[in-house]
Image (tube, rainbow, N blue to C red):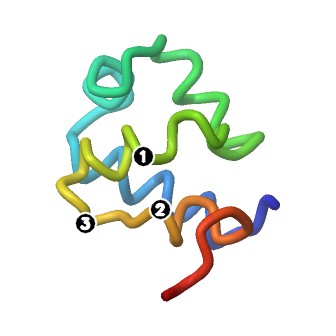
Amino acid sequence: MMTGNTINAIEKAIKCVGTHKICAELCGISRQAVTRWLKTGIPARHVIALEKATGGKVTRYELRPDLYPRD
């Protein structure tokens, strides 16, 4: 489920780690894939990696509330 909030969470995560390139390296993907997330949302298989990359500053709930409801 794509919402403005999920895009904001992805942008927040990218800023948290520094750049698209660093984000991509931490998640084991290409920089272009990270850029694509800003248009299409983050695939489920990368949510946990991105949460860990941010040290938990951006949560899986923020990134994909459709898959990870609030506790």
> Where does residue 52 sit, x and y in percent of width and height?
26, 47
Disc 1 residue type (three-letter):
Ile
| Alpha carbon separation for disc pair 2 and 3 | 10 Å
Residue at image coords 35%, 64%: 58
Based on the displayed image, in which of its 4 quarters is residue 53 positioned? top left
Residue 39, image x and y in percent?
Answer: 74, 41
On residue 60, the disc is 2
Sequence-wise, the earlier of marks 1 and 2 is 1
Q: Which quadrant of the structure image shows residue 49?
A: top left
Q: Amino acid at mark 3?
A: Lys
Q: Give the amino acid type for the residue marked by disc 2 in the picture.
A: Arg
User: Pointer 1 and pointer 2: residues touching (CB < 8 Å)?
Assistant: yes
Residue lying at the far bottom in this picture: please name it.
Answer: 71
Q: Which residue is mark 1?
A: 48
Q: CA distance from mark 1 to mark 2?
A: 6 Å
SS class, disc 1: helix
Camera-side mark, 2 or 3: 2
Q: In the visual, does 30 lie left or right of 15?
A: right
Residue at (37, 26) in percent of width and height:
27
- Secondary structure at numbered mark 3: loop
Percent coordinates x, y for residue 46 in the rendering: 51, 36
Image height of 41 relative to 68, above or below:
above
14 relative to 57, above or below: above
Q: Residues within 10 Å of mark 2 (few under 14, many from 20)?
A: many
Q: Quadrant of the N terminus?
A: bottom right
Identify the residue at the far front of this view: 71
Question: Mark 3, mark 1: which one is toward the viewer?
Answer: 1
